[in-house]
Image (cartoon, rainbow, N blue to C red):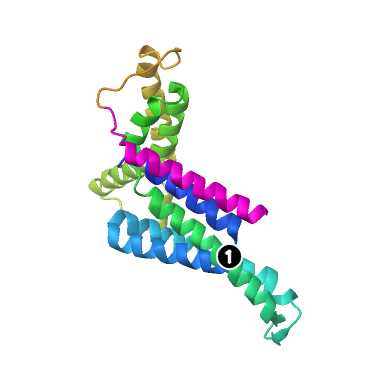
Amino acid sequence: MNPLTPLVAAACAIVTVMVLHNPWVSAAFLLGAVVLGLLAGRRHRRALVAGLVMSVPALVSYGLIYAPFGDHEIARPLIPVTSDGLAVAGDLGLRFAAMTCAGLVLASFVDADALMRTLQLRIPAPLVYMTGSVVRLLPMAQQRWRTIRQVQASRGVDVTTWRSRGSVVLPLIVGLINDAATRSRPLQRTGIGEPGPRTVLVAVPDRPAERVGRWVLVLVAVAAVVTAVL
């Protein structure tokens, strides 16, 4: 699958849920994200869990904002709780969960290397490099974190305490800065800032069916926007 396909699907899902703002639509997208995340694989399940975890504080904040200020009070434990305020909070929380989970689960199908090779033929090379750096920052930081912890453990340092975790922060930051400086020199020699078209050694396939499918998804999202506006 071309990486642009799940990326476009994720963006269209977020836009559709956001602009329609219908609880049934939100519930359908959330259910679809849950089913897809559970059936697809470990990485996609982790994206689903991340989306659900991120939705909890949003739901709580919506409850604190809207639940006390409705018209029909149903309880007063510490603050007034209204039924219509809870309905608004639940609707907004469901929409947030649907957007977050659908977007993260669909985006988890994107292969970062294939995405960079695809974008290299479509956008300027410096922008491709900046995008790739952002995409790879977290995996690189995680790998260097594990390496530093392994070095500390091999020296007999107790790596289970919070103090030992805090001592990793400074070498982690220094290491990431050093990695960036090391990569900048060969990038300058390869002419990344020079204008002109780029080529890739192994092109990412982009089947006509996928291109048509992406345009269909975009048209559906546009139709959802028009429907919401009208």
> Horizontal and vertical percent for residue 91?
59, 69
> Horizontal and vertical percent for residue 79?
71, 80
* Dominant secondary structure, magenta: helix
Query: Regarding mark 1 in the picture, which secondary structure is present there?
Result: loop
- Splitting the image into 4 quarters, where does residue 179 fall? top left
Residue placed at 50% from the left, 50% from the top?
A: 220
Foreground pick, 216 / 66: 216
The answer to whether residue 163 of the structure is visible from this angle is no
Residue type beneath disc 1: Asn
- Splitting the image into 4 quarters, where does residue 4 fall? top left
Read off the magenta span.
203-230
Foreground pick, 180 / 222: 222
In the picture, the quarter occupied by the N terminus is top left
Foreground pick, 63 / 202: 202
The answer to whether residue 128 of the structure is visible from this angle is yes
**Which residue corresponds to mark 1?**
22
